[in-house]
Image (cartoon, rainbow, N blue to C red):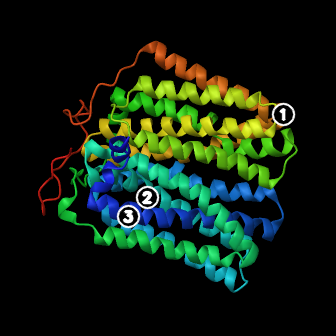
Amino acid sequence: MTAALRRSFDSLAVPNYRRYFAGQVVSLSGNWMQNIAEMWLIVQLTHNGALVGVTAALQFLPMLLFGAWGGVLADRFDKRKILLVTQAAYAVVAFTLWSLVVTDVAQLWMVYVLSLASGLVTAFDNPSRQSFYVEMVGEQHVRNAVSLNSAAFTGARIVGPAVAGLLIAFVGIAVCFLIDGLSYLAVLAALLAMRTSELHVQRRSTREKGHLQAGLRYIWATDDLRRPLLVMAVIFTFVFEWQVLVPLLAEQTFGAGAREFGLLSAAAGLGSFIGAILMANRAAIPTMRRLAAYLCGVGAAMVLVAFAPGLPVAMLLMVPVGFAAMSFMITGNTMLQLASRPEARGRVMALYGVVFLGSTPIGAPIVGVVAERIGAPATFLLTGGFAIAVGAVVLARGWRTGRLAGSAAVVADPQLPVVAADAERPVVASG
């Protein structure tokens, strides 16, 4: 038991990742506090729920439009330096929101502009952050690092909103933005404190033109990248839209209020947290078969939620939904990390960000319209059944993973530009 628990935190033995993880724990909590405060601010300014959805679209749309270009930059430049710039930019957005609210001059258009600015930063931050894990810990511990970061994200998702609610009730909205701005200083400190000589430096692409097209050709020509990305694109768009379904389930199906909605969301968050911790302990190589199995688990849990006779049972069943969904996401993420050529990993993870975050402006309205017409339980049943069907197709096709962690690079597009790693320091062997 002790050895298994120790394996769950293997990547924390790496000093650079330990610093980064500590900074993330602080920053993610602040980020969730800002999300809640921003949504509540818009409600106070407009008293219009539809306009809250516009904010979410503005935050995710830049990822859909520009996320791939963020991957080009991640493959071309020092990822740590990119993250220093993006984290500082996030802090500027948070401090600006704080100043607008505390001086009582905030207007809807200002919040929208800052939401769009935050989304633009995410389009360039996400590819570098996702592909930076392997530089911190090497391929041997990349899944553990991704899993622990997912656990931190999920834990912050549970704690951050709760703290934000108390602060808004007793202190005011402005303090949430101030805390978020200060929380980014923890990540900046962690990035600055890293020992660059201990990073697993990856080869970088050249500065010639055509990198985006070359990266897309490489991904499409590589089975171990194309297949999981296609599956995840479909599932993230049409299945992973609980931010639409859960509030409808609480209000329309069970006649409950905001407190019960929060409990349903927290139950899914608890399952996600458990899934992230258990995935951090797994040593098996991620494969399409495992990805499909977790997807079938997501679908089965959603189908059970559709038939929940009451709110307590629905809360209980949201735990396995969160567990299976987190296991699916971590497996897919790790597959892409391990199957990517080092000099293209930024573009690969950028495309992952596009299908994960950029799918929301497309899928959420579709699922919302369906749920309004047939009800939340029937939509849970429909999307859960769809997830099972996609998982069954993948299992039936018997797709196998062609590259294992640490093996030779997959055959790629010959036009994919490559260059040796940073000439100022030697490459540290991964794994």
Up/down of 270 relative to 286, above or below:
below
Label 3 vs label 2: CA separation?
9 Å
Give the image location of residue 260, x and y in percent: 78, 50
Give the image location of residue 143, x and y in percent: 36, 42
- Give SS at disc 3: helix
The image quarter containing residue 99 is: bottom right
Instruction: Name the residue tied to disc 2.
Output: 124
Up/down of 108 relative to 253, above or below:
below
Name the amino acid type tagged 3. Leu
Task: Specify the quadrant that holds the C terminus.
Answer: top left
Query: Residue at left 32%, top 66%?
Result: 81
Give the image location of residue 426, x and y in percent: 11, 57
- Give SS at disc 2: helix
6 vs 324, left or right, is: left
Give the image location of residue 156, x and y in percent: 55, 58
Instruction: Name the residue tied to disc 1.
Output: 373
118 vs 73, left or right, is: right
Name the amino acid type tagged 2. Phe
Query: Residue at left 79%, top 40%?
Result: 311
Instruction: Name the residue tied to disc 3.
Output: 83
Q: Which disc number belongs to residue 304?
A: none
